[in-house]
Image (spheres, coloured by chain):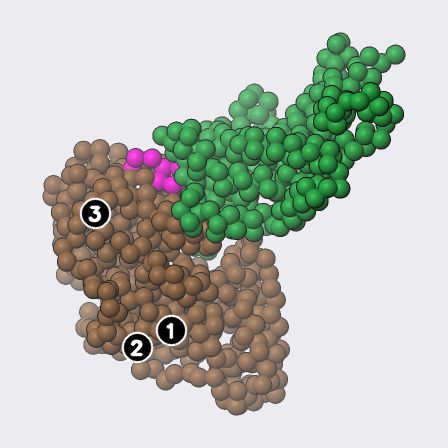
Chain colours: A green, B brown
Amino acid sequence: MNEIWRMIGRRLLLGLLTLFVISVVIFGATELLPGDLARELLGQSATPETLAALREQLGLNDPAPIRYLNWLWGVLHGDFGVSMATKKPIAELVGGRLGNTLFLALYAAALSVPLSLMLGVLAALWRNSVFDRMSNALALTSISFPEFFVAYILILWLAQTGLFPSMVRITASTTFSERIYMGFLPALTLTLVVTAHMMRMTRAAIINLLASPYIEMARLKGMSPLRVVLRHAVPNALAPIINVVALNLAYLITGVVVVEVVFVYPGLGQLMVDAVTNRDIPVVQAIALIFASAYVLLNLVADVLSTITNPRLMHRR
Amino acid sequence: MTNAMFPRGMTRRGVLKGGMALTAAGLILPAGMAMAQAEPKKGGVFRVGIGHGSTTDGYDPGLWDQLYVQTFAAARHNQLIEIAADGSLVGEIAESWSSSDGANWVFKIRDGVTFHSGKPVTVDDVIASLNHHRGEASTSAVKPYFDAVTDIKADGTNLVVTLNAPNADFPYLMSDYHLPVMPGTDGKIDPTSPDGCGGYIVESYEPGVQATLKRNPDYWKSDRAHFDQIVLLTILDPAARLNALMTNEVDVIDQVDPASIGLLESRGVANILSISGNAHYVFPMDARAAPFTDNNVRLALKYAFDRQELVDKILAGHGSVSNDNPIGPANRYFFADMEAKTYDPDKAKSYLKKAGMDKLEVTLSAANAAFAGAVDAAVLMSEKAAPAGITITVDRVPDDGYWDNVWMKKPFCASYWGGRPVEDQMFTTAYQTGAAWNESFWSNAEFDKLLVAARSELDEAKRKDMYQEMQRLVSFEGSTIIPMYNNYVMALSKALATPEKVANNWNLDGFRCVERWWFA
């Protein structure tokens, strides 16, 4: 067990280093963008005087490294600072949006993970059957369409007929069941987009194992095919499956801007796009760090879980 | 004819286009489309889907720049003066105003109006609200308006504004959407507070997402603000906006994509409201940079493309041809009878010859950030210019950073204007020599002289002549190609009713749909 703790500790430290590097890269990249916050806030109507006054107010006249270090110092003290554009604390700005994004990600995961695991196992079980071919073809079709196309098709079929709302309006008074109802179409869109990846990985991992001698042995003992798969194949196929599930969860958290735009879903992605177009660097940094943390943490969890499920890694000699 | 305003209920696309509209509006009403213009009814939740809005929006009036914040402001604030649907001035917080010489303006502040907080509106609040846009440290977009203001003070309960030169149109400036009356403390307003004296009180606001407001029970206008509640939603994606309207998630949407107007009408779920106003699309040429220094070159370009084609293809007919005139049909002194420029490659060639050239090569930088369809418009112009011996190379540039790196930097590019209610405002902002947003860097001594003279001219007829001469100068000697006025195109749910006249000074009934419309 100590082995595991040591691994988690090492991974966390590496993760922190990764986050630091990411923050430098993001800051550098945003510095390369033309224009600055003052310019974006005033838009076409900016005059040199108002620009100068606003820059002074926002502290944009400090050199870039100083601004970066100021920001980093704040973050190390748990203070993400205030948004330059709205003057609101970033924690407050991001908090609600992060909740919405996580809700949608979990909702989509709750639909897609069981669905794809089930389809994957069944497809492996009935390899080369009509079912296998159909589920493969459908999953690949839906992953091949761009997300917005899937979204519009769903709106056409399910929203314009009045079954589900085409946009998501979440306020403080929205109840959980309303959220489930309103969020159904975006969650379904995301489900269609990520299912293929997880399903095919599950199918491939299991089929790979079905050729091993110990499966042969189980079959020769006279076990039912389903039992062979569930008892003997799945536990050994977990490592790759866990990894691909974690990767898709991270995608669900970070990569859903397009779906957010189509369904007018107030999530983090839209906030980040706004912040980038407005050059509101502290907000961009904060969100980038959240996204990067999601990747780092989910990968860590996936590694730990796949180690635990594999006795050969747990009890190394 | 072109300044017709199109009442609700006219959904036939052909009817709405161009000049036919006025006659049609008066004579033909599609069956079953009786105009429910009776008494406005109170009640209902009014949901507006707006194609603007960002998480960086806020309550500081000096930074407002797009339809979302503008409409939101119109819902919760009053200004000194309102522009009525017919273009005339109506007192809002200012009950009346007068000036003996055009330089000293006295505004009588309306009595008995209160802010949402219950505090009465006083002249000190008005002064604080105006001063927010003055002075060195101000970041307001309308700071230039106040360059001419030497003093703002109270005289008893009246407001006195002193200008350094007479300006007959000064009350019009006070109707600008940047100038709401907000509560002041110690001579300053709080630019982070939603408190106002308008028809609705803010309940919740999440920038870039939505705002909900409830009716102000103490609102001083009894015949306005009919809805119990309003919800303003940011829906950036044009297709998502359309969907929201078609699935009855919202009651009105702005900026309907011209390409989908026909489809929307064929579904019969909404009424299209197409309002011709002063908004226009422009292609400024840098008058300081060769070859645009020569007016013959500029004229050649002005005759080398088909204006009607641009209106038909870029605006899908929801607009009208402009004669390189930034003053629109909704302005008082619009010069409608000016000699029209039509597509004429031979004429363009003859102007080139006068400039001593037999062919011309220019690069036009365009991005759709300037206006929807700017790149397509540039390509159409380039195609039409070829027979005149003019090669226009279209340089498609990125949307991001367009106003930084291209506009007023490249010698020939695309841009847009929302139009201004007052001629002086439009000319001072974009055509006067050295004006901060003089995007063509055009400089004309005669024009500048007329502009100053007209401002203080109090004789209507003479003013009209002066403004028309200025329009002629901009059109025939100016350095800006203005091919078209774009209509404000909105789609309304069938349950919604509007007054017979819908304002054309800005989109969404001059931002006042929240106050002026109701559910039939």
Disc 2 is placed on an element classified as: helix
For the residues marked 2 and 3, what is the alpha-carbon distance in whole angstroms?
33 Å
Q: First in sequence: mark 3 or mark 1?
A: 3
The residue mark sitting in front, 2 or 3, is 2
Q: Amino acid at mark 1?
A: Ser
> Residue B320, labelled with which disc?
1
Disc 1 is placed on an element classified as: strand
Kindly identify the residue that appears in the image at 82 percent across and 20 percent down. A221
Crowd band around label 2 with a 10 angstrom C-alpha radius: few (<14), some (14–19), many (20+) = some
- Quarter-of-image position of residue B125: top left
Q: Amino acid at mark 2?
A: Met
Query: Range of the magenta residues?
Result: B202-211
Considering depth in this image, is B437 or B499 the residue closer to the camera?
Answer: B499
Q: Amino acid at mark 3?
A: Ala
Residue B207 falls inside the magenta stretch: yes
Q: Which residue is mark 2?
A: B20
Residue under mark 2: which chain is it in? B
- Vertical order, A280 against B508 (above or below): above
Q: Which residue is mark 3?
A: B225
Q: Is residue A59 left or right of residue B505?
A: right
Kindly identify the residue that appears in the image at 57 percent across and 72 percent down. B379
Cβ atoms under marks 1 and 2 closer than 8 Å: no
- Vertical order, A70 against B34 (above or below): above
For the residues marked 3 and 1, what is the alpha-carbon distance in whole angstroms?
32 Å
Crowd band around label 3 with a 10 angstrom C-alpha radius: few (<14), some (14–19), many (20+) = many
- Vertical order, B383 against A286 (above or below): below
Measuring from the top left, give residue A244's x and y in whole percent.
Answer: 70, 32
Q: Is residue B272 left or right of residue B242?
A: left
Q: Residue furthest front?
A: A222
Considering depth in this image, is B440 or B444 the residue closer to the camera?
Answer: B440
- Quarter-of-image position of residue A211: top right
> Residue B514, labelled with which disc?
none
